[in-house]
Amino acid sequence: MKGSAKVEEKQTAEIMGETLRALKHDVKNQLSNILLAIEQLRYEIPNPSEDCIFYLDSISMSSAKIDVLLKETE
């Protein structure tokens, strides 16, 4: 009984690891899209207001923090 419980535990850990890797990959892809869109907006918005710059910077910094968190789990 103990041996089969350990096998199930190992299989569960492997599935969780694969799920985490897939989730991290998908989140990183979306972060890349967000960062590319922000950079494009910076070039396309003529004379952005201070508020606009603040919002773009906030989105960019938050995205970078999420990326750091994802890298820390590697």
Image (cartoon, rainbow, N blue to C red):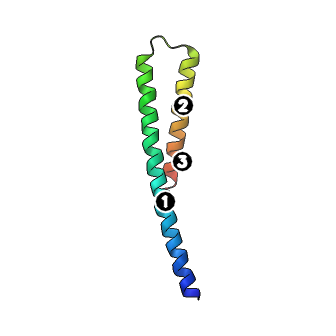
Q: Secondary structure at mark 1?
A: helix
Q: Is residue 73 above or below residue 64?
A: below
Residue that extends furthest to the bottom in the rendered view of this protein:
1
Q: Are marks 3 and 2 in contact (CB under 8 Å)?
A: no
Q: Residue type at mark 3? A: Leu
Residue pictured at 49% horizontal, 66% vertical: 15
The label nearer to you, 2 versus 1, is 1
Residue pictured at 55% horizontal, 81% vertical: 6
State the CA–CA distance, disc 3 to disc 2. 15 Å
The label nearer to you, 3 versus 2, is 2
Q: Which residue is mark 3?
A: 69
State the CA–CA distance, disc 1 to disc 3. 17 Å
Q: Secondary structure at mark 3?
A: helix
Q: Nearer the viewer, residue 16 or 53?
A: 16
Q: Which residue is mark 2?
A: 59
**Label drawn at residue 19:** 1
- Determine crowd level at label 3: few under 14, some 14-19, many 20+ residues with C-alpha closer than 10 A: few
